[in-house]
């Protein structure tokens, strides 16, 4: 069971962990442990598993349980742990939510059902049921490019009034204007975070976002940029982010993104293999050369625990 109060807020830098596999495609637990240690050393405000950047769509129930157990063991009880939920119905989402709760998650980042597209009133019932059944902080994941499910601002406002639904991750482009609209419409009483690999993180923060959930290979570089922003050093934050931007952008490519994240983690000495599971694609020669060029101009230090 969770060690945090259900209404504990999920804010700040919450990277979504990649799922390390070995070269044969099996879950690589030692690499996962190092990955968590790297995030903690970078000063994260929480950790997320089973998101899109985690290849959550390719994980078995047993692997999910192992990942939660190992992540919680390394992170300890005080680091908020967010579990992505991608059930295609209320029943399957509840099953995933209860497994995540029992595995040590403090919060749920929940995609709406996306095969049979729900109507607005069905989404209200869906998120209300998950929050009530799990007893955990529920984050609505507004990601229409992935799900095909649109969430207008009035619907998000309605969801924000449900007990236990405490935040939204806005990934509807353009993200920054919608972040601002939701912040205004909820009177600042509802936490709004960004995703999309932190592509527009500074613009989102300027509109009232209180957190971001990018991939996990550049956490130690992004953390001081966000610290500059919070301290009012906007010019320094923009300069630092502009230096990181080519890598952020490169990690947004459909089907290649997972291989990009993992290749960088391998080069930094954090995980051992860049193996990705179908239908994700490994890097082709041209993409690898392009990544080489980016890293030549955006060098990231090697890391050892």
Image (cartoon, helix red, strand yellow):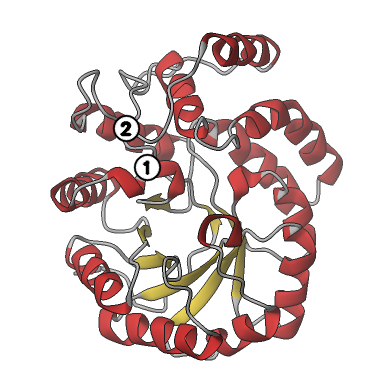
Observer able to see residue 231: no
Residue occupying the point 48% across, 18% down: 283
Relative side of 146 to 37, left or right: right
Question: Dot 1: what SS?
Answer: loop
Are there few (<14), some (14-19), or many (20+) residues within 10 Å of tag 1? many
Q: Is residue 149 above or below residue 211?
A: below
* In this view, 29 is above or below 199: above
**Residue 20 percent coordinates (x, y):** 30, 31
Q: Name the residue carrying label 2.
A: 277
Q: Position of residue 294 (x, y in %)?
A: 67, 16
Q: Tell whether label 1 touches label 2 (CB within 8 Å).
A: yes
Which numbered disc covers residue 55?
1
- The quarter of the displayed image where residue 149 is located: bottom right
Where residue 186 appears, x then y in whole percent? 68, 84
Q: Is residue 216 visible?
A: yes
Q: Quadrant of residue 19?
A: top left
Of 201 and 222, which appears nearest the observer?
A: 201
């Amino acid at each position: 069971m969770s060690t945090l109060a259900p209404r504990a807020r999920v804010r700040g830098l919450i990277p979504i962990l990649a799922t390390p596999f070995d070269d044969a495609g099996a879950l690589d637990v030692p690499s996962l442990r190092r990955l968590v240690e790297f995030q903690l050393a970078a000063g994260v405000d929480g950790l997320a598993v089973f998101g899109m950047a985690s290849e959550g769509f390719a994980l078995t129930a047993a692997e999910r349980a192992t990942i939660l157990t190992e992540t919680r063991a390394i992170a300890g009880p005080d680091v908020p742990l967010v579990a992505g939920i991608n059930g295609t119905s209320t029943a399957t989402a509840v099953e995933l939510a209860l497994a995540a709760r029992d595995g040590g998650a403090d919060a749920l980042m929940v995609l709406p059902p996306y095969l049979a597209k729900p109507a607005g009133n069905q989404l209200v019932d869906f998120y209300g049921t998950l929050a009530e059944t799990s007893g955990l902080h529920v984050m609505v994941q507004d990601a229409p490019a992935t799900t095909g499910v649109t969430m207008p601002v009035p619907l998000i406002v309605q969801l924000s009034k449900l007990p236990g639904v405490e935040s939204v991750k806005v990934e509807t482009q353009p993200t920054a204007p919608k972040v601002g609209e939701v912040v205004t419409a909820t009177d600042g009483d509802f936490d709004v975070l960004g995703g999309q690999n932190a592509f527009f993180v500074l613009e989102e923060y300027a509109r009232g976002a209180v957190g971001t959930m990018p991939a996990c290979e550049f956490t130690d570089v992004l953390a001081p940029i966000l610290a500059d922003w919070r301290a009012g050093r906007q010019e320094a934050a923009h300069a630092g982010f502009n230096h990181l931007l080519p890598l952020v952008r490169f990690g947004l490519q459909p089907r290649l993104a997972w291989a990009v994240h993992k290749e960088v983690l391998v080069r930094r000495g954090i995980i051992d293999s860049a193996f990705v599971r179908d239908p994700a694609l490994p890097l082709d020669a041209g993409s690898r050369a392009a990544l080489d060029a980016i890293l030549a101009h955006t060098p990231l230090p090697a890391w050892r625990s």
